[in-house]
Amino acid sequence: MSIEWLGRAQGHARTMTISSRSGKDTCIPRSILKIIPYFADDMRALDFSLPFEAFLTMVPLPHSMFSSLEELRMAPLSFPRGMISRKRIEAFARAPKLRSLCLVLPAGDWDHTFLSILCIPFSQLSDLSITLQGPCTPRTTFRYISACTDLRRCTLNIPPFAAVFDASPPTEYDISELRSLTIRFVASARYSNTRSDAAEDTLIGQTAFMLNSLTMPQLEEFDLELSASVHRACTWDHGAMLSLVQRSGMPLRRLRLARIEVVSAQLVELLQAVPTLESLQLHVENVIESNFYQALGYRSRSTFLPDLTELVISEDGYSLDRGLDWFIEEAIAVRCQWAEPWSPGQTTLQRLHMSVTRELQPTLKLFLYSLFYNAHRTCKSADVYVADAKEWIGVDRKTNTVVYQSKKGTEGYSS
């Protein structure tokens, strides 16, 4: 890399990635450190993936650099055990336009090593993403989140069972400006064989700890995914989630729950507390029972999700309750009357995706085909798809027709 080459883009915002392919480099080459100050004011985005020691070579950089920097990603590849540094990286301390920070942190004492030497203007961040690859406590993570007083979007990716049990009472963190929160316990190879009940109890307890610690009065989007392992979903603490919603009074518009086993009655209770919901995505590992569909299709209950326009359901399980299909039919009939809304001011679903591993009754599937066909003929904006163990019914976007087709072959019909 040369100054002449970078000079061609002088005056234009640019991005730079500095990474170590081997993971063994202990310093950033002096040639790169030497040219960074020449173009620091034009840098819009920086991405560092380096061993911990290599970050220390940035200490000499002045703290008045990076006046145009908006996005910063830092991924230390390793933390040396027992290493304590009194040096501080201040190059980003006065980056006035920095709004987005992404941290990918490996196993180790990252709280007292990496973040203790990294001077970041947390109070001006609007987007924060933290991916943890080792043990942590929610309290440690939230301490940095709460320092972001203007935070609008936050994403936490944590491997299952990397959470360390914390028995102390939760501290309440009021994140007043937060609009979008994603918490994902993402299964990884390291934890793929973890199946113990004790480990799952720790995950459930730490999820409840997180939910009990937060107050988010402006939250509009919430994405929660609990994966006890690659092969196993996890139950959740319904009381903690309901308390969070009631305590915050949030105007929630989008909710996604994934890899979770739900109790339908509790799900209905939670959804009744968020009448502002416009999009609901449920990816669960059991059968959603009739309580939910009954509430969704009850014609005189306009207070249950009256603004819902998107419903995505994916369930994995078997049910002996054949009456469940009747409730599903009623719910879809009520919510999918595109031409004539069933209640004044009631919105209708514009997107319906439903996938189940069991087999739906033939009468329900024929009803759905007829409903989708009539709706598509009069209003082609709806996006619909329903699939069971054997067949799928929906709009084929390539041919712009409604299709009822077997999953195994091409038999079926369309119109």
Image (tube, rainbow, N blue to C red):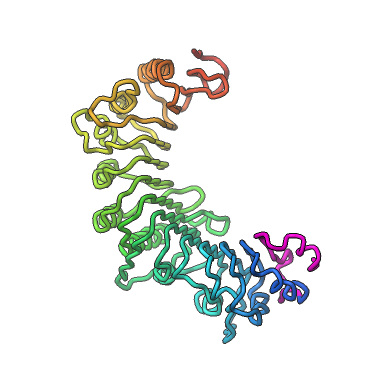
Q: Does the magenta run of residues contain 295?
A: no
Side of 136 relative to 291 (left or right) = right
Query: Can residue 232 be seen in this snapshot?
Result: yes
Q: Toward which corner of the image does residue 102 lie, by quadrant?
A: bottom right
Q: Does the magenta run of residues contain 24?
A: yes
Query: Can residue 109 be seen in this snapshot?
Result: no
Side of 98 relative to 238 (left or right) = right
Where 342 sits versus 65, above or below? above
Residue shown at 53%/64% (left/top)?
101
Side of 352 relative to 13 (left or right) = left
What's drawn in magenta, residue-wise?
1-29
Residue shown at 32%/73% (left/top)?
168
**Of the pair 125 and 111, the residue shown nearer to us:** 125
Q: Toward which corner of the image does residue 350 lie, by quadrant?
A: top left
Q: Position of residue 268 (x, y in %)?
A: 26, 42
Where 330 sits versus 69, above or below? above
Q: Position of residue 81 (x, y in %)?
A: 59, 79
Residue shown at 58%/55% (left/top)?
189
Q: Position of residue 41 (x, y in %)?
A: 64, 69
Q: Residue furthest front?
A: 11
